[in-house]
Amino acid sequence: MTIRTLFVANRGEIAVRIIRAAQELGIRTVQAVSAADQDMLAARLADEVIELGPAPARRSYLDTAAVLAALRRCGADALHPGYGFLSENADFAEAVEASGVVFVGPRPETIRSMGDKAHARACAVAAGVPIVPGSQGRIEDVDAALSEASRIGYPVMIKAAAGGGGRGIRVARDADELLKLVPQAASEALAGFGDGGLYLEAFIEDARHIEVQVLGDGTSVVHLFERECSLQRRRQKVWEEAPASLLPGDLREELCKSAVRLAQAVRYRGAGTLEYLYDRRRQAFYFIEMNTRIQVEHPVTEMVTGVDLIREMLLIAGGVPLRHRQEDIHCRGHAIEVRINAEDPARGFLPSPGRIEELAVPGGPGVRFDTGAYPGYQVPPYYDSLIGKLVVWGEDRPHALGRLARSLDELRIGPLATTIAMHSELALADDVRSGEVSTSWLERWLTPPSAGRSDAA
């Protein structure tokens, strides 16, 4: 079918991104907003705006009944969920499609299958994709956890089976810690995801976080190479690159092929990402989970491949077969994305909502700033603090790093406290420039000097 009207069930920069892609395809857009988002940029750009409810996300963007009611009222024939909120809620996707509206993303059964992390591991094993040594499915109680941890070997990660975004994770280095942390993790998982199920994985020290972008139409799947997301704070990504630095070429090819195998095994439709841990010492990679949605960091893939992922999602959802063959997709140059948040790193990343009085965006070749903000925009205190994503491309990684440093110097967002200065410092850090980082590096780097900051990866 041809999509005529698209309902955008998200906010901020990703809503702007979706609206622009839809408009280029001649698709009419309806932007869902909370009471706090009536004047966001996406609402200004959309053809129609419809209010879901009060400011809190649970009463607006996360309220499935409110979203479905708004969807019926506006008469849209497709819905794009963006990322976060309801984007990986299989029941919601099922309800959307049951109402005769196209869900721009994978089939509900795929979301459900890959959304349960323990089940996703089983799918990976069946597809011949290596996984981190861990429990065979969910652990039912503390005794089972002790038994599995003994088999896997300490340290182990305790993870929420239905989790994501780094939430619900604990690291136990011995049996005593495991006994204490399993109930905590189960409680947090139940509160955060409505499912207290857990599973265990071996904890790989100083791992690197690598992910592969895939695109499928339910029959055919291609990969768009990999990204590295090792710079993380509290398991939340803050800096992303494509391609991954210091990844051997033969291993890159094997990694990307494994992602295609798994995506094909679940008949993947739309844009998705398979996440891996890379153990550089062993030169081995392990699948950890699949994100059945567009990712925050998708622009770096677009910059190195020239493929507009949101456009492709809309075309596939409208019934157009996958337009790209694997041999036609090439990775050119290097791209870096840094997340600019309304947070104060000097005060423990305290959120800094408020009115943006000044917004000066850098320009020049290979520079992109995805944002939902504008001068005079009021950053609300109710949601994620992301203001925008600064993305740069260079002929190689040193070129991209230089362009990033220059662009960060030009970027002005005032008077709010932001993470711009932190990224400027990171862009000059020796370990970052050499690529010698891991998923634990940024936490150590952020340690106050009095506590002994270390630049060791």
Image (cartoon, rainbow, N blue to C red):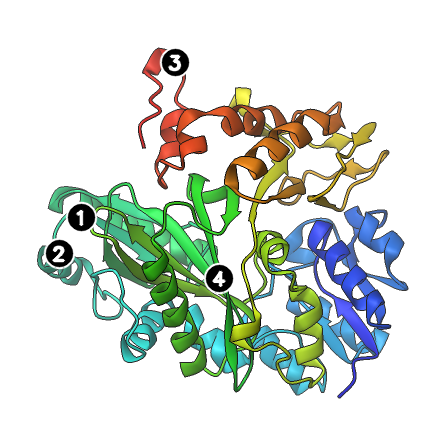
Residue 132 at x, y percent in the picture: 25, 60
Identify the residue under disc 2.
146
- Gap in Å between the C-alphas at discs 3 and 1? 34 Å
> Going from the N terminus, do you reach mark 4 or mark 2 first?
2
The secondary structure type at the circle numbered 3 is: helix
Label 3: how many Cα within 10 Å (few below 14, some 14–19, many 20+): few
Q: Is residue 121 left or right of residue 430?
A: left
Q: Nearer the viewer's eye, disc 4 or disc 3?
A: 4
Whether pointer 3 and pointer 2 mark residues with C-beta atoms closer than 8 Å, the reply is no
Image mark for residue 225: 4
Whether pointer 4 and pointer 3 mark residues with C-beta atoms closer than 8 Å, the reply is no
- Gap in Å between the C-alphas at discs 2 and 1? 8 Å
Image mark for residue 179: 1
The secondary structure type at the circle numbered 4 is: strand
The secondary structure type at the circle numbered 1 is: helix
Residue at 57% in and 72% down = 328
- The image quarter containing residue 400 is top right
